[in-house]
Image (cartoon, rainbow, N blue to C red):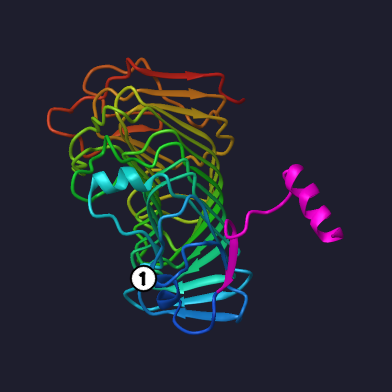
Amino acid sequence: MRNLTRTLVLFYLGLLPVLGLCKEYIVPTGDVSAFFAKLPADATTVRFSAAAEYRANGDIVLPARQLLVIDGAGSKLILGANSHGFTVRIADQQEANKRTSSRYTIRDFAAIEGGRKAIDLKATLGSTISNCRFTGQTEAAIDLRFCLMARVQNVLVTNPAKRGIVLRQGDWPGANGANSQSNSTVLDQCRVFCSKTTTQAFTILNTGGVRMTDCISEGAGPEHDLFLSATMDGNEESLARNPVVKSFHLSNFHVEHKARKASIYVNMPVKAVVDLQNVYWNGPQTAPVILYMSGQLNLTDIGWWDKGYVIATRVTAPRINVDRCHNGLSIDTKVGGAATRSGVLELRQPLLGQATLKLDHVRVQRPSM
């Protein structure tokens, strides 16, 4: 009788859990891919707490869930050579639109090693990846496609063979750069330690409203530390014309090596705002620190500038605002004639018909003394 009374009280107070609504499962030892393939429908949390080390030979396919929490619990996960790690399978854009009702939290793995990718999420809204280390993936450590309002936080990527962290649009049938972006995603306190073959530490494609804060690119020099582009067809010999990409913000970015092609590449729509704030390059650079194609580029609070740094532009009339930066970041906006360089800004490998540097849309204000 006493237990019945207590149950009724909890029920009326709204404190009684609904049986079968939330359930936690412990991932057993053995093949992780096989376990997720048969994950019970009532699972809301899975914990990797039965062993210090797990293995998955193939893809770990995630089911549709309003929220599925994947807790690494400090364990190590070793992936097979062809595994895409934690992934979602999408047939076409119609299915992708439906799957955005699902979201995932992937957290607290001591390491996820090997595989083609460690995390390959698609078509989610509000997913999070936090407190994980990824090592030795051959394609990308994290690849997010059509992952709206995602957050990647306190993540360490070590020795990716190609790309570190990628945010981009969907690439399945019916998807394009205007209907399946990873908009409004945040990268916070993420470090990519590059290998000698790394192409891009961070890649943002056809995606708007992204914010990168307190991130690091170090290790061997990649082709690019940050590759930012919104070309609908992937042709980087033309200017970005994505009609829905509006902005990108980077602050407190630390670079510890020499990029092979350019540290930061910018090819955004002409009206898109690109903020680069408090960027620090440690030591001399042989490639341009910024390679500009298109976009409204704002450089602010860059307090360190080596005399050999170059901002390269491939177009005649770049749109660049410089404010509160080191006085070595100088551009003489009165240059005329057939000039191809002014201060740190240089016209390099110009696109067809872009032969003379024009600085009508370049401003430098409030330099440090």
The relative height of residue 140 versus residue 93 in the rendered view (above or below) is below
Q: Is residue 19 magenta?
A: yes
Q: Is residue 191 left or right of residue 204?
A: right
Badge 1 density bin: few <14, some 14–19, many ≥20, Cα 10 Å: many
Q: Is residue 213 magenta?
A: no
Residue 63 figure quarter: bottom left
Residue 209, image x, y percentages:
44, 33
Q: Residue furthest bottom?
A: 30
Residue 222, image x, y percentages:
39, 58
Residue 20, image x, y percentages:
58, 60
Residue drawn at (24%, 25%) of the image: 316
Please provide the residue range marked out in magenta: 1-26
Answer whether residue 60 is visible to the viewer in this image: yes
Q: Is residue 367 left or right of residue 32?
A: right
Q: Is residue 23 left or right of residue 199?
A: right
The relative height of residue 258 versus residue 346 in the rendered view (above or below) is below
Q: Amino acid at mark 1?
A: Asp
Residue drawn at (13%, 28%) of the image: 353
Residue drawn at (27%, 20%) of the image: 358
Residue 93 figure quarter: top left
The residue labelled by disc 1 is 59
Residue 56, image x, y percentages:
42, 78
The relative height of residue 337 versus residue 276 in the rendered view (above or below) is above
Compare residues 167 and 322 and report the one nearer the observer. 167
Answer whether residue 109 is visible to the viewer in this image: no
Dot 1 falls on a residue whose secondary structure is loop
Quarter placement of the N terminus? bottom right
